[in-house]
Image (cartoon, rainbow, N blue to C red):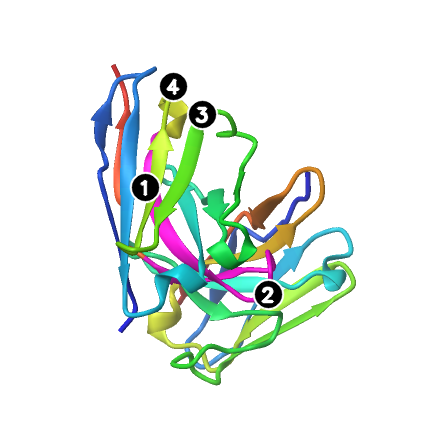
Amino acid sequence: SYVLTQPPSVSVAPGETARITCGGDNVGSRSVHWYQQRPGQAPVVVMYYDSHRPSGIPERFSGSNSENTATLTISRVEAGDEADYYCQVWDGGSNFHYVFGTGTKVTVL
Amino acid sequence: EVQVVESGGGLVQPGRSLRLSCTASGFIFGDYAMNWVRQAPGKGLEWVGLIRSKAYGGTTAYAASVKGRFTISRDDSKSIAYLQMNSLKTEDTALYYCTRGDGGYDMYYFDYWGQGTLVTVSS
């Protein structure tokens, strides 16, 4: 089945840029969505269809997707961005399911 | 305001059954697919299954790990989705989230989530 691989952790200083990658075989041909999960809270979508930002999500969040890697970029990182981030795609076909990435813990130093 | 609220979780013995409910408000429930996603303690997210809107036949799909044991249904008149879980295993222990699926047919992303209901399978 389809696998999405993320780095377990990313550390970034306040005000700097965090880049969270999501690797998958030809993931660029799929639509990738991103979720933020703060400790003890439910996930929140922060990016959908690769680069669309839901209302209420700061412009500091951006997304891209090409070839074998999708990337969520958080500019001017703030303490409130500390959370787990998951990418997700749809895998249709004989083994229909929705795949989540392994998750990345973003730590703001 | 869109709200999704799960209920029905609890402690259950292996092999037994449990039914979760997902009560929604703030949108036309019948127009959307509803999904269940679970998260084992300290682990990542795992999609469990979905039920499409009546416009797409109200059909269902399940993750391989629960297929044949779990069943999703919906009552659009009450804006409720259900997750019937049979033959529960210890590995089904998780926080179960109900989420709304938005986007094109089957190309869903999960735009609204409940706070989850905890299911613990243990003897």
First in residue order: circle 4 vs circle 2: 4
How far apart, in angstroms, are the residues tagged by discs 3 and 1? 18 Å
* In this view, the mark in front (3 or 1): 3
Identify the amino acid type marked 4: Ser
Whether residue A73 is visible:
yes
Characterize the local packing of mark 2: few (<14), some (14-19) or many (20 or more) Cα atoms within 10 angstroms: few
- Can you tell which mark lies on residue B69? 3
- Can you tell which mark lies on residue B95? 1
Range shown magenta: B93-113
Identify the amino acid type marked 3: Arg
Residue A46 drawn in magenta = no
Q: Which residue is mark 4?
A: B87
Q: Does label 2 lie on the same chain as label 4?
A: yes
Query: What residue appears at the point 42 percent right and 34 percent down from the top-left corner?
Result: B71
How far apart, in angstroms, are the residues tagged by discs 4 and 3? 6 Å
First in residue order: circle 4 vs circle 3: 3
Q: Which residue is mark 2?
A: B104
Q: Secondary structure at mark 3?
A: loop
Splitting the image into 4 quarters, where does residue B91 fall? top left
Q: Secondary structure at mark 2?
A: loop
Image marks 3 and 1: residues in contact by CB distance under 8 Å: no
First in residue order: circle 1 vs circle 4: 4
Whether residue B115 is visible:
no
Image marks 4 and 3: residues in contact by CB distance under 8 Å: yes
Identify the amino acid type marked 2: Gly
In the rendered image, the vertical position of residue B66 relative to residue B97, given as above or below: above
